[in-house]
């Protein structure tokens, strides 16, 4: 019986060792997630340096949205701690303004200061964005070469566009790594909970068995020796032997008591070790819960457009690919639309009025959709709607509802009344063998044709 108890305790110690290994895995994963966060902060600092250099090279007489976007970006990067949402919004505004107002730009003459700034930018990017990820690092090398070339030619706006592009790619690669770490975290979290329950059950059972076994052993040996002592007392001719045996009995009884005391001390020690182990597991569980919550928050931010609150381009690409691979979701229809004469709104009223227009159209379009339809902000003033299990006829009805909802938008800004909005929409339905690129290209072409036909209409291709 005592041997059985020792087997139980040995197994407990093995389980304790396994649990410590599990705890180390949790700590390792925690460090990995911390490293991802540090990598993002490092990229933000590199981007701060890049933006400060590039914005300092821009002409002071830039007009309209570009100048306003640059000033807004300077304010964001001047903060002690850059808010990722503010940075993302500022970069998008700058890139949109560069695309809108980039035509007809006068290229300034090349100067030694410009060349030096180009080298500065390249070094900042290299130091801040390298990931050890082959595909991304190759894209980074190409982007640095393009950025340096643009700066040496004085083409600062294009350089800024390349910077925004590589930052977006960096965020996407980092998000993939974060999602993988999140999956590993979920698996370990379940393992921790299962281990905690197993430990509690095992040690509870071992404790009961240990006490029971020790008590039974004590009773049996004591009873046996007691009978021996009684027999010896009745033998008057064996006085010397009786004295020797009685002394031996007393020694055995003391040994039993000592053994029982040792067992109780060992059991108490095991209980204390279990208490500490449970405390470690609780701390690990709480840390993982916090990491899961933070990971979910970051994941939502990575898929959401910060200005309008709808899903962004990256989320669109993932969902469309998923639906096109799912036979149950076919056919998939795609609507692409943008705001008519959006540049005029920005030029006349400023980018804040343009932001209000984007938020209003996102709100009205979302309210016009069916249950399974999903709205995304693609880029600038361009939006897309994914409609699973929808043929062209039904998709056209949804597109028309969105168009009519946009016509009802009217707001005032800085004393200007009745800023109204219309949109042009392109629609296409998936066909056999379609990929996301081919379906989007058809819908986008339909949008261009809608604009050529006079705007404020739905065109199907």
Image (cartoon, rainbow, N blue to C red):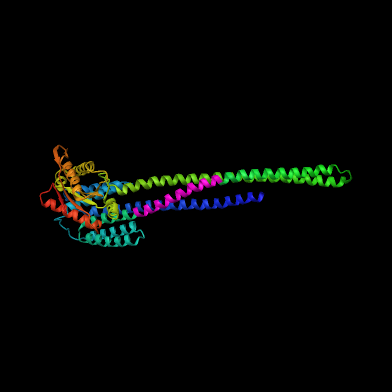
Instruction: Judge from the rendering whether residue 325 lies leftward or rightward of residue 288; answer left or right.
Output: left
Queried whether the magenta region covers residue 182, the answer comes back as yes
Residue 51: x, y in percent? 26, 53
Question: For this view, does 317 lie left or right of residue 194?
Answer: left
Q: Quadrant of residue 247?
A: top right
Residue 264 shows in the view = no
Instruction: Report the magenta stretch's main SS.
Output: helix
Is the C terminus in the top left, top right, bottom left or bottom right quadrant? bottom left
- Residue 112 image point, x, y percent: 23, 61
Tell me which residue sits at (56%, 47%) in the image.
Answer: 202
Q: Residue 32: horizontal and vertical position, in percent?
A: 41, 53
Nearest the eye: 325 or 12:
325
Q: Which range is magenta?
A: 175-201
Between 42 and 266, the residue placed more toward the observer is 266
Counting every numbered tag in the picture gives 0
Residue 349 in percent (x, y) is at: 16, 43
Residue 365 is drawn in which quadrant?
Answer: top left
Along the viewing direction, whichever of 428 and 120 lies nearer the viewer: 428
């Amino acid at each position: 019986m005592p041997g059985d108890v020792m087997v139980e305790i040995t197994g407990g110690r093995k389980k304790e060792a396994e649990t410590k290994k599990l705890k180390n895995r949790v700590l390792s994963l925690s460090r990995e997630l911390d490293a991802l966060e540090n990598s993002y902060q490092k990229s933000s600092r590199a981007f701060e340096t890049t933006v400060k250099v590039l914005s300092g090279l821009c002409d002071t007489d830039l007009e309209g949205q570009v100048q306003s976007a640059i000033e807004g970006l300077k304010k964001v990067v001047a903060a002690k701690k850059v808010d990722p949402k503010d940075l993302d919004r500022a970069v998008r505004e700058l890139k949109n303004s560069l695309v809108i107002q980039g035509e007809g730009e006068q290229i300034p003459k090349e100067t030694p200061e410009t060349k030096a700034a180009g080298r500065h930018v390249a070094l900042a990017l290299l130091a801040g964005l390298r990931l050890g990820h082959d595909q991304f690092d190759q894209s980074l090398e190409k982007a640095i070469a393009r950025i340096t070339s643009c700066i040496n030619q004085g083409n600062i706006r294009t350089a800024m566009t390349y910077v925004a592009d590589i930052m977006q790619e960096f965020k996407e690669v980092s998000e993939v790594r974060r999602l993988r770490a999140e999956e590993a975290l979920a698996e370990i979290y379940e393992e921790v909970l299962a281990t905690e329950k197993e430990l509690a059950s095992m040690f509870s059972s071992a404790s009961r068995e240990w006490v029971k076994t020790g008590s039974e052993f004590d009773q049996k040996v004591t009873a046996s020796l007691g009978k021996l002592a009684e027999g010896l007392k009745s033998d008057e001719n064996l006085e010397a032997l009786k004295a020797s045996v009685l002394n031996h009995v007393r020694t055995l009884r003391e040994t039993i008591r000592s053994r029982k005391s040792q067992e109780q001390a060992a059991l108490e020690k095991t209980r204390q070790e279990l208490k500490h182990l449970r405390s470690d597991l609780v701390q690990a569980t709480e840390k993982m819960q916090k990491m899961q919550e933070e990971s979910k928050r970051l994941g939502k931010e990575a898929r959401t457009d910060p200005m309008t609150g709808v899903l962004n381009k990256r989320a669109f690409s993932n969902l469309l690919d998923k639906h096109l691979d799912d036979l149950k979701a076919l056919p998939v229809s795609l609507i692409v639309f943008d705001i008519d004469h959006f540049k005029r709104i920005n030029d006349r009223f400023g980018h804040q009025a343009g932001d209000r227009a984007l938020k209003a159209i996102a709100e009205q379009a979302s309210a016009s959709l069916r249950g399974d339809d999903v709205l995304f902000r693609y880029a600038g003033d361009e939006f897309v709607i994914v409609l699973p299990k929808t043929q062209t006829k039904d998709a056209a009805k949804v597109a028309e509802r969105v168009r009519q909802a946009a016509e009802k938008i009217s707001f005032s800004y800085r004393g200007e009344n009745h800023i109204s909005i219309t949109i042009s929409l392109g629609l296409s339905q998936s066909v056999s063998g379609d990929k996301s690129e081919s379906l989007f290209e058809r819908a986008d072409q339909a949008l261009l044709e809608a604009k050529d036909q006079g705007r404020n209409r739905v065109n199907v291709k």
